[in-house]
Image (tube, grey):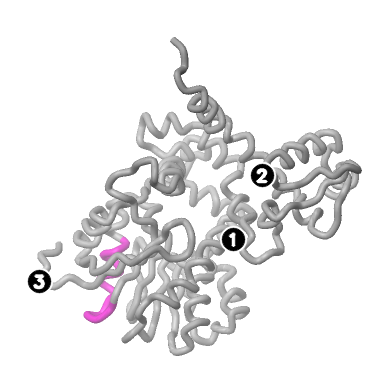
């Protein structure tokens, strides 16, 4: 058989071996190469001295990064950082470095190596790697947990500005951020909306850095930090309950439990705001690959999934809530604002 489209084969090779440039980018960020090259061109030997690497091997990595356009090799044999590689610096606004760290940890990397197992069994492969859930693994590794929460803060910070600007906060006095981790999203919303108060709830390890984040944002005096488990209960008294990248980590049964806890805490006029990707009913070549990659990442690491609008509506209905609106994309990576309200007898909700 002759391949009729050589370009199709070439594209498949690029896809199949995509793990190699992915690791190249990760190692560059982990070693701090972009930061070292931020101010001056450096030789591989000097970079190796500063980063504790093997100079000849580092030289090979740098040439690989140059082929990706992230650094540039000069005529004198030194290397300089390019604009394409600049977001890998740790000290720049919008740095992507925090997002790379936890997802290239040994446990996550090994779990992706067992994607076949997850597809065959429907079980998160991370559990066969670590012996438990990914959240238990992160909790047992303080440094990894810190990297994970830093990664979540990158995304939360991007969405906070859009939510504060686009969402109608009429009638909202208190915002409860459920599973809000370090409080980056809530800090951003409160900072843009001086009339609001906030309640941040997450596990004890999740909120451990929240006081410093809220203090730095100048909103600590308007925000209560609560350590708790949203699978057991959600604080009462809020006018708006926000779930940012929470529900997609859980199976349907757990999501209904979380949302039902929220419904029980809500007053009649309160609302729910879910900020997550909304999957299309049909995926085709125009679909953003982030959606399917994120969904498979959830398959490998959690028991959750990315959901369609119809699937969100079913979860809400089962929890005694009704979907009222799905807004346009906010921030990056296609997150959308999904609004819900307590169901009434006429809605026919559970």
Instruction: Say which of 11 and 334 sits in front.
Output: 11
- Can you identify the residue that label 1 sits on? 150
**Nearer the N terminus, badge 2 or badge 1?**
2
Element on which disc 1 rests: helix
**Viewer-nearest residue: 37 or 285:** 285
Q: Residue at x 42, y 42 (%)?
A: 296
Between the residue at mark 2 and the residue at mark 1, the CA separation in whole angstroms equals 18 Å
Pick whichever of labels 3 and 1 is earlier in the sequence.
1
Image vertical order of residue 296 relative to residue 165, above or below: above
Residue pictured at 52% horizontal, 63% vertical: 206
Above or below for 87 versus 287: below
Residue 302 appears in the rendering: no
Q: Residue at x 45, y 44 (%)?
A: 293
Residue shown at 38% from the left, 70% from the top: 242
Q: Estimate how packed mark 1 is, as few (under 14), some (14 to 19) or many (20 or more) residues with alpha carbons within 10 Å.
A: many
Q: How far apart in space, not on screen, are marks 2 and 3 (Cα)?
A: 54 Å
The residues tagged by marks 3 and 1 sit, at their Cα atoms, a distance apart of 42 Å
In the displayed structure image, the side of residue 132 where residue 18 appears, left or right = right
Give the main secondary structure of the magenta stretch.
helix
Does the magenta segment cover residue 133?
no
Q: Which residue is mark 2?
A: 25
Magenta region = 258-270
**Mark linked to residue 345:** 3
**Which is more foreground, mark 2 or mark 1?**
2
- The N terminus is located in which quarter? top left
Please state if 15 lies on the left or on the right of 71 as rendered: left
């Amino acid at each position: 058989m002759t391949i009729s489209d050589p370009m199709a084969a070439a594209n498949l090779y690029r896809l199949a071996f995509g793990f190699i440039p992915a690791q190249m980018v990760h190692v560059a960020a982990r070693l701090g190469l972009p930061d070292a090259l931020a101010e001056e061109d450096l030789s591989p030997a000097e970079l190796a001295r500063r980063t504790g690497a093997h100079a000849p091997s580092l030289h090979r990595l740098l040439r690989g990064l140059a082929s990706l356009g992230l650094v540039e090799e000069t005529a004198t044999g030194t290397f300089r950082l390019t604009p394409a590689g600049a977001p890998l610096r740790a000290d720049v606004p919008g740095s992507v470095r925090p997002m790379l760290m936890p997802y290239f940890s040994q446990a996550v990397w090994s779990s992706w190596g067992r994607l076949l197992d997850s597809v065959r069994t429907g079980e998160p492969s991370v559990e066969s790697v670590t012996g438990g859930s990914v959240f238990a693994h992160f909790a047992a590794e303080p440094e990894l947990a810190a990297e994970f929460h830093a990664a979540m803060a990158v995304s939360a910070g991007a969405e906070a500005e859009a939510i504060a600007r686009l969402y109608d906060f009429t009638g909202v006095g208190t915002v409860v951020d459920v599973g809000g981790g370090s409080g980056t999203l809530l800090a951003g919303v409160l900072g843009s909306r001086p009339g609001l108060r906030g309640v941040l709830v997450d596990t004890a390890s999740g909120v451990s850095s929240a006081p410093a984040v809220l203090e730095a944002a100048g909103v600590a005096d308007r925000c209560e930090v609560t350590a708790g488990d949203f699978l057991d209960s959600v604080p009462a008294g809020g006018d708006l309950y926000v779930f940012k990248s929470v529900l997609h980590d859980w199976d349907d049964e757990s999501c209904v439990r979380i949302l039902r806890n929220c419904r029980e805490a809500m007053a009649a006029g309160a609302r729910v705001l879910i900020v997550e990707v909304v999957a299309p009913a049909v995926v085709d070549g125009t679909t953003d690959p982030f959606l399917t990659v994120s969904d498979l990442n959830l398959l490998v690491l959690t028991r959750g999934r990315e959901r369609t609008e119809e699937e969100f509506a079913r979860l809400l209905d089962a929890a005694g809530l009704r979907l009222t609106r799905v807004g346009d994309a906010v921030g990056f990576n296609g997150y959308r604002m999904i609004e819900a309200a307590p169901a009434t007898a006429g809605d026919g909700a559970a």
